[in-house]
Image (cartoon, rainbow, N blue to C red):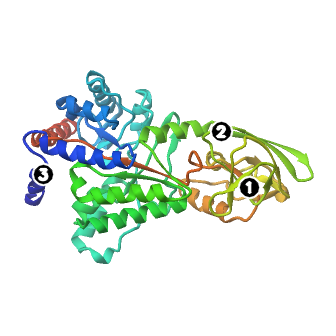
Amino acid sequence: MLSRIGTVFGRFGISSKRFERLLYRYATVTRNLDCVPTFPITAVTLKRHPKLIRELYQQGIEFAVHGYIHTDYGVLPLKEQMKHFKKAINVFEWSQLPFTGFRAPFLRINNKTPQALRDLGFPYDSSSAVHWDVFDETKYTRESWREYEKLLNFYQSRQANDYLVLPRIDDSLVEIPVSIPDDEAMVERLGIIDRKEISEIWGSVLERVYNGGELFTLQLHPERIIYCENALADVIQKAKELIPSVWTATLQEIAGWWRERDSFAFEINSKGDGKYRIEAKCTERATILIKNCRANVPVNQWFDSYQSITARDFIIESPLRPVIGVRNNSSPAAVTFLKREGYIIERSDNPDNYGIYFNNLSNFSDSDEKPLSQEIDKANNPLLRYWRWPDQARSALCVTGDIDSITLIDFVLRICENSLENWRQRSR
C-alpha cells in the first residue's frame, strides 16, 4: 500500500498539469507514427476536466465511455448498469464530446452488460481480455507471478493460444478483445520497468498476432507512458514495416469494419469443365483471397499460399468447388463461424465434390474455432474467401489507454465513489 501511494503521488498532482504532460506525450508518440489512439474515460473524470479532453479530441484522439464511475460493473444488475451508462451518456453530451463505444473499468462485465449497451445504442464493447503466453515465468519472483495470475483471474482473461483473438458481433454489438500483457500487468504486477524488455514483450505479441491474422488491442494507460513510450513507438513502427500490412485503426474503425464485412457474400455458379463464375458482393475495401486455383484476372501473391484478387467478377478454374462443405447436421454455430470467416459454406452429405469437407461439426463451441481455422489454413485444397481485414492487411493493431483519474483529487474521489457504490450494492 505504501509503495502504491508513492507511485500515485509520482504520477498525479493536485492540479492537472502533471497528467496533462503525460497525455500530450502519449498523443505526440502516436501522432508522429500516424496512429490514432482510443481513450475510454470515466464520465465523472470528463465532467471535472471537459476543456482538456475536448482539446485532445480536437487533436484527433478518439474517446469512449469507461463507465460513469470507476466501479466493477460485473457485480451490478441490469437496472443499475443502465442507470450508470445513461448518466455517462448525459455527461458526454453535456461536454459536447462524441464517444465511440464502451470499455468497462477493470475489464469486468456480466451477462447483462451487452443488453444494456445494445439498448443504449453503443456500437461496441471492448471489455473482454485475452492473454498471450509471452513470459518466461522463471524470470520473476513467486510473489510477482502470483500477482500476475491474480490479475488474469480478475480480468476473467482467456488464453490466446486457445481462442481466436478477433472481434465478434453479438446481435448489434461488436465485441473487441483487449490483449494482455498490458502496462498494468508488466509494470505493476511483474515489476518490469526496463524499456527494452517491455518492447520485446509487445513485439512478441505483435508477431503472434500477425502470424495468426488476428487483432492486437494494445492497452497502455497514460500514467505509465514514461515506462512504455519506447515500446509503444517500437510496436507501431514494426507494424507499419510488415508486408502484408498491419491495419492500424481505432476501436471505432475496428467495429465499423466488422459490421461492414459482415454483409459480404459470394455468388458462385458452375460454368462446367471445372470453371466457376464468382460475383463478390462487397465493398472496395474487401480483401478477396484464393488458394490452389486459377483466376482469369490478375492476382498478387499475398501470405502463405494465398493470392489476392481486386476484381469483383471473375472466373476460377478448380478441380473441386472452392468452398467448404459441411454435413447437414452441422451445428448452426459452426456454420455461422465459418461464414463470418469469409468462406462459402454448403451443407451436403456428399463430400466428393469438396476439397475441404467437415462431417464432425454437430457440436461446436468458441474453443473449437481456432483449431478449425488452423486446420483449414493447413489444407492444400482449392479455396475462396474474404479475409478478416480491409485493403489486404494481414492483421490489425489498435492502441488504447483508459483514463479514470487526472489529478490526485480524482484518484481519491475514485476510491470514495467505488466504495460508496460497493456499500450500496451490499445494502441492497
Residue 391: mark: none
Residue 383: mark: 1
Which secondary structure lies at badge 3? helix
Nearer-the-camera pick, 48 or 129: 48
Q: Is residue 306 left or right of residue 184?
A: right
Q: Quadrant of the C terminus?
A: top left
**Residue 84 in view here:** yes
Comes first in the chain, label 2 or label 1 = 2
Q: Indicate whether 228 appears above or below 401.
A: below
Which amino acid type is shown beneath numbered disc 2?
Phe
Q: Indicate whether 48 appears above or below 213.
A: above
Q: Position of residue 160 (x, y in %)?
A: 46, 60
Q: Residue at the top extreme?
A: 94
Say which residue label 3 marks.
8
Q: Indicate whether 272 appears above or below 47.
A: below
Q: Quadrant of residue 134?
A: bottom left
Say which residue label 2 marks.
264
Residue at 20% across, 35% down = 45
Q: Is residue 182 left or right of residue 240?
A: left
Which secondary structure lies at badge 1? strand
Q: Position of residue 267 (x, y in %)?
A: 77, 40
